[in-house]
Image: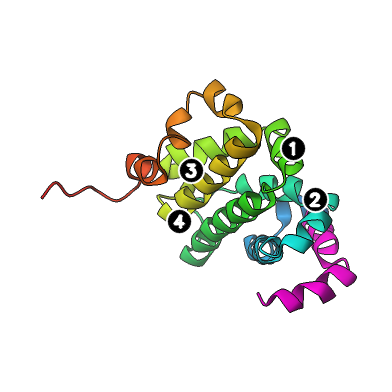
């Protein structure tokens, strides 16, 4: 998203209105609506000046709810793909917002670390998506950088934040390794 496009969105309180709309629909909110909301929040979070506004609108709470989305064998392929994108975009937005230590602490307080760890360790939770894995690893590393590794250690998942991102990725990636 062009950084200049964020200012009209901030002026119109778009993120807050969108989150409220999704919240009002509750469990009946379309996965495609959730995808659009997560994408907008991730794009807005890319602009550092918009992060305080997103924190004020409690975007983290909505994003953590979006991380709870799961695919179902009863869903069609487009819905399954959209659910994957919701998880990935939500984790990206959380990672960007966690540049602020206050927001990172909020994620820890809201038990978001637990869900991020589960998405990393359980391939089925993320529909075997390595894109979701990378986004969750980035979010966990940003949280650990700002809040310490205590919350990750409590979940016996220190390997997700130490030593190198590539090592963590290879450990939990869905792709089979080649030893040739």
Residue bearing the label numbered 1: 106
How many numbered circles are shown? 4
Q: Quadrant of the N terminus?
A: bottom right
Q: Is residue 119 left or right of residue 2?
A: left
What mark, if any, has residue 55 been given in the picture?
2
First of labels 4, 2 by sequence position:
2
Residue located 73% across and 31% down the image: 109
Query: Nearest the camera: 52 or 129?
Result: 52
Residue bearing the label numbered 3: 125
- Check if mark 4's residue and mark 3's residue have beta carbons within 8 Å: no
Mark 1 or mark 4, whichever is nearer to me: 1
First of labels 1, 3 by sequence position:
1
Q: Residue furthest left?
A: 180
What mark, if any, has residue 131 been given in the picture?
4
Q: Is residue 58 left or right of residue 99?
A: right
- Check if mark 1's residue and mark 2's residue have beta carbons within 8 Å: yes
Q: Classify mark 2: residues with Cα within 10 Å, few (<14), some (14-19) or many (20+).
A: some
Q: Secondary structure at mark 3?
A: helix
Q: Is residue 136 above or below residue 151?
A: below
Mark 4 or mark 2, whichever is nearer to me: 2
Q: Which residues are magenta?
A: 1-23
Query: Image quarter for residue 51?
Result: bottom right
x and y percent of residue 133 in the render? 46, 48
Residue located 40% across and 41% down the image: 164
């Amino acid at each position: 998203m062009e950084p200049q496009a964020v200012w009209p969105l901030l002026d119109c309180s778009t993120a807050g209105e969108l989150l409220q709309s999704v919240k009002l629909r509750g469990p009946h909110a379309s996965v495609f609506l959730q995808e659009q909301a997560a994408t907008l929040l991730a794009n807005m979070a890319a602009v550092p000046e918009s992060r305080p506004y997103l924190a004020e609108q409690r975007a983290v709470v909505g994003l953590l709810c979006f991380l709870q989305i799961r695919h179902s064998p009863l869903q069609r392929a487009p819905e399954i793909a959209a659910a994957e994108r919701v998880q990935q975009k939500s984790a990206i937005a959380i990672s960007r917002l966690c540049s602020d230590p206050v927001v990172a602490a909020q994620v820890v307080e809201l038990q978001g670390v637990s869900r991020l760890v589960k998405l990393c360790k359980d391939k089925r939770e993320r529909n075997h998506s390595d894109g979701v894995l990378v986004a969750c690893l980035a979010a966990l590393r940003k949280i650990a950088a700002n809040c310490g590794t205590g919350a990750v250690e409590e979940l016996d998942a220190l390997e997700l934040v130490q030593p190198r991102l590539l090592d963590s990725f290879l450990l939990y990636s869905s792709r089979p390794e080649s030893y040739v």
